[in-house]
Image (cartoon, rainbow, N blue to C red):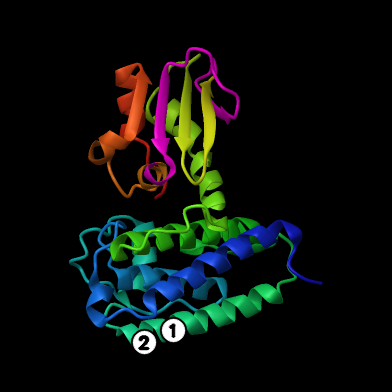
Amino acid sequence: MSLHPSLQSYADAWTHSVEAISELVQPLPEAQWNLATPCPAWSVRDVVSHVIGLDCEMLGDPRPIHTLPRDLYHVRTDLQRYMEMQVDVRRHHTGPEMTAELEYTIIRRSRQLRNETRQPTTAVRGPLGTEQTLEAAMRLRAFDVWLHEQDLRTALGRPGNLDSPGALVARDMLLDGLAKVVAREAGAPPGTAVVVDVQGPVEFLRTVRVDAEGRGSVDGSPSLGPAVTLSLDWETYVRLAAGRVRHEAVGDRVKTEGDPELARAILDNFAVTP
């Protein structure tokens, strides 16, 4: 037996992105490990620590026994505390220590994936003692590693891979939250249609429709006379939906048509990642 076909695309996307991360950070001088990334309060070292830590958890490794400092003011929720543990425990690691652990983790995870025979529905450990299916966990890892690859590329001034396998996983993950943004967070009234038109390396047009009960749904059909149309490039869509930037900072890259108040409410609530 081998990896279930429905998991293969996530394994391929993870591999592509994590190997790109390794290539990006391998030659870095020590000072560049401290560069700030678009991921709030995290440096290059912190982002790589996060990638290593969560892949170690996918391997079943025990979580580190570590007490977080009290002055980490960006850590406010239980989920943030959970994620910060794997990051803070490596904050004093040198560049060579980081790259060595990353390479070893990639080798171990790649071997695990080659030998993976579990079904997609198998329950695996999730954050904060939760359980999730293996398929959901692998999909999230593919998305997370690609997104952090982009964080590192931004910090290091090395753009690329905006159309890689991980980008397609990210597209679907981010679109999963679009209906909630429009219908619940922005409060679009029943009967409203909102069109999001994205151009660039990953192109798509989606319409969010709000039904009579106020529930939102997303489809690929155009709408005649939508209440709002948002037009933007793929990179800007990712940065907004992943909470890496506020829309005020990229206003020149987002074109809005229709109801200005609803458009602003949508953009104010566009981030769908925790």
Residue at image coords 53%, 13%: 224
Residue at image coords 55%, 66%: 16
Q: Is residue 232 magenta?
A: yes
Mark on residue 101? 1
The residue range painted magenta reads 211-236
Amino acid type of the residue that numbered disc 2 sits on in the rendered structure:
Glu
Mark on residue 208? none
Question: Where residue 147 sits in the image (x, y, percent)?
Answer: 44, 57
Question: Where residue 209 sits in the image (x, y, percent)?
Answer: 53, 22
Is the N terminus in the top left, top right, bottom left or bottom right quadrant? bottom right
Would you say 90 lies left or right of 220 here?
A: left
Tell me the element at label 1. helix
Answer with the quarter of the image where residue 262 lies.
top left
Tell me the element at label 2. helix
Question: Where residue 160 sits in the image (x, y, percent)?
Answer: 43, 59
Q: Determine which residue is flagged by label 2.
A: 97
Q: Residues within 10 Å of mark 1 (few under 14, many from 20)?
A: some
Q: Is residue 215 visible?
A: no
Q: Please, is residue 49 above or below residue 215 in the view?
A: below
Number of residue marks: 2
Q: Is residue 80 magenta?
A: no
Q: Are marks 1 and 2 in contact (CB under 8 Å)?
A: yes
Question: Where residue 41 sits in the image (x, y, percent)?
Answer: 25, 61
**For the view shown, which residue lies furthest in the right direction?**
1
